[in-house]
């Protein structure tokens, strides 16, 4: 008679395995994370409050598995948290794999910092350039915040102008307080706040500047590059002896977008000349046009000039 009774250990085998699997699924769960360059198992320990100890990352070991039997079986290397995982039903497996394969800390760090490069054509333009305006703003903020009294004065100046021309017509102060471009050579700061008794002089010029932009004579991208100059700086910079910059009533402007485009620059200058001819007298508009592309505006005398401050050198044909 053949004994068909199974050994007791075989009858207990399946329940034990089932209990082990249930315990594993309750205390932790594992996710296989893969991309083009690596595959790793992330073990999250649900009951731990410590985020460092609740996450363990296992990445494939670089060691060859050729000597292992039973086909391919990837090795594992703990990247973090292995020595702090407690109460995890997979802890024994992790420790066993660590003993089987040599832990290489430097390799783990390199793998952890690896950046996968997509060699395909990028979908969006990712080339960015730092504009000169951004650089100017950074310098202006440093200049402004270097002195608390100065910051209060500049804020008072901004409020004053806003009350006269409207806050929307006050240009960025990083432009409005710029001084002569040769400030460094002359030993001055890049920005100058005019004395309070001169603040009113810039108001009509700001109104003119706003009107020129609203009518499309000047493009929206126009920037201010020089306003008030103290007499000492004006003299060092080669300004006219009676320059309206010293009274804070003048500004030099330019259009960065038109650099390298003589046609656009000439068209804009023609528009300014026409405005000066037909509407300039009511604004007491002083217009200076220079070959460099710089444009001078003030409201302290109806006149025009060119490179040598003479009316005959103006490029206006009207």
Image (cartoon, helix red, strand yellow):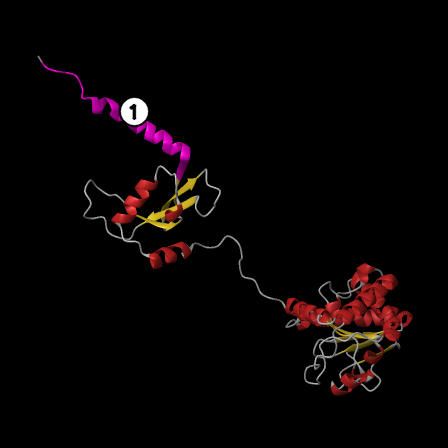
Could you tell me if residue 178 is visible in this image?
Answer: yes
Vertical order, 296 against 158 (above or below): below
Farthest left residue? 1
Q: What residue did someone put label 1 on?
A: 15
Frontmost residue, 309 versus 228: 228
Magenta-tinted stretch: 2-30
Is 313 magenta? The answer is no
Frontmost residue, 62 versus 54: 54
Residue at the image point whose x is 32% and y is 44% from the top: 94
Q: Quadrant of the N terminus?
A: top left
Frontmost residue, 58 versus 285: 58
Farthest top residue? 1
Residue at the image point whose x is 27% and y is 25% from the top: 14
Total residue callouts: 1
Quadrant of the rendered image containing residue 145:
bottom right
Residue at the image point whose x is 50% and y is 52% from the top: 123
**In this rendering, would 146 be left or right of 122?**
right
Frontmost residue, 168 versus 8: 8
Image x and y of residue 113, in percent? 42, 57
Quadrant of the rendered image containing residue 199:
bottom right
Image x and y of residue 187, in percent? 70, 84
Q: Residues within 10 Å of mark 1 (few under 14, many from 20)?
A: few
Vertical order, 178 against 26 (above or below): below
Is 25 magenta? The answer is yes
Residue at the image point whose x is 77% and y is 71% from the top: 150
- Predominant secondary structure in magenta? helix
Image x and y of residue 93, in percent? 30, 41
Could you tell me if residue 119 is visible in this image?
Answer: no
Image x and y of residue 206, in percent? 83, 68
Say what secondary structure mark 1 lies in.
helix
Q: Quadrant of the C terminus?
A: bottom right
């Amino acid at each position: 008679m053949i004994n068909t009774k199974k050994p007791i250990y075989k009858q207990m085998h399946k329940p034990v395995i089932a209990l082990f699997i249930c315990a594993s699924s309750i205390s932790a769960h594992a996710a296989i994370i893969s991309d083009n360059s690596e595959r790793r198992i992330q073990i999250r320990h649900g009951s731990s409050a410590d985020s460092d100890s609740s996450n363990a990352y296992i990445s494939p070991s670089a060691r060859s598995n050729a000597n292992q039997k039973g086909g391919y079986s990837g090795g594992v290397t703990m990247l973090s948290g292995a020595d702090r995982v407690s109460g995890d039903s997979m802890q024994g497996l992790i420790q066993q794999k660590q003993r089987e394969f040599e832990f290489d800390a430097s390799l783990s760090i390199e793998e952890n910092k690896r950046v996968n490069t997509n060699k395909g054509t990028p979908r969006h333009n990712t080339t960015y350039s730092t504009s000169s305006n951004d650089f100017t703003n950074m310098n202006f903020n440093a200049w402004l915040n270097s002195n608390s009294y100065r910051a209060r004065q500049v804020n008072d100046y901004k409020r004053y102008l806003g009350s006269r021309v409207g806050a929307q017509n006050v240009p960025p102060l990083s432009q409005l307080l710029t001084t002569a471009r040769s400030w460094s050579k002359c030993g001055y700061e890049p920005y100058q706040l005019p004395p309070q008794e001169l603040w009113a002089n810039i108001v009509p010029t700001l109104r003119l500047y706003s009107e020129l932009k609203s009518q499309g004579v000047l493009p929206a991208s126009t920037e201010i590059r020089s306003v008030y100059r103290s007499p000492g700086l004006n003299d060092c910079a080669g300004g006219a002896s009676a320059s309206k910059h010293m009274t804070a009533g003048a500004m030099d402007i330019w259009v960065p977008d038109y650099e390298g485009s003589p046609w656009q620059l000439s068209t804009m200058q023609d528009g300014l000349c026409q405005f000066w001819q037909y509407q300039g007298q009511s604004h007491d508009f002083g217009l200076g046009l220079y070959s460099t592309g710089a444009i001078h505006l003030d409201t302290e005398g109806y006149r025009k000039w060119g490179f040598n401050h003479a009316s005959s050198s103006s490029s206006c044909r009207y």
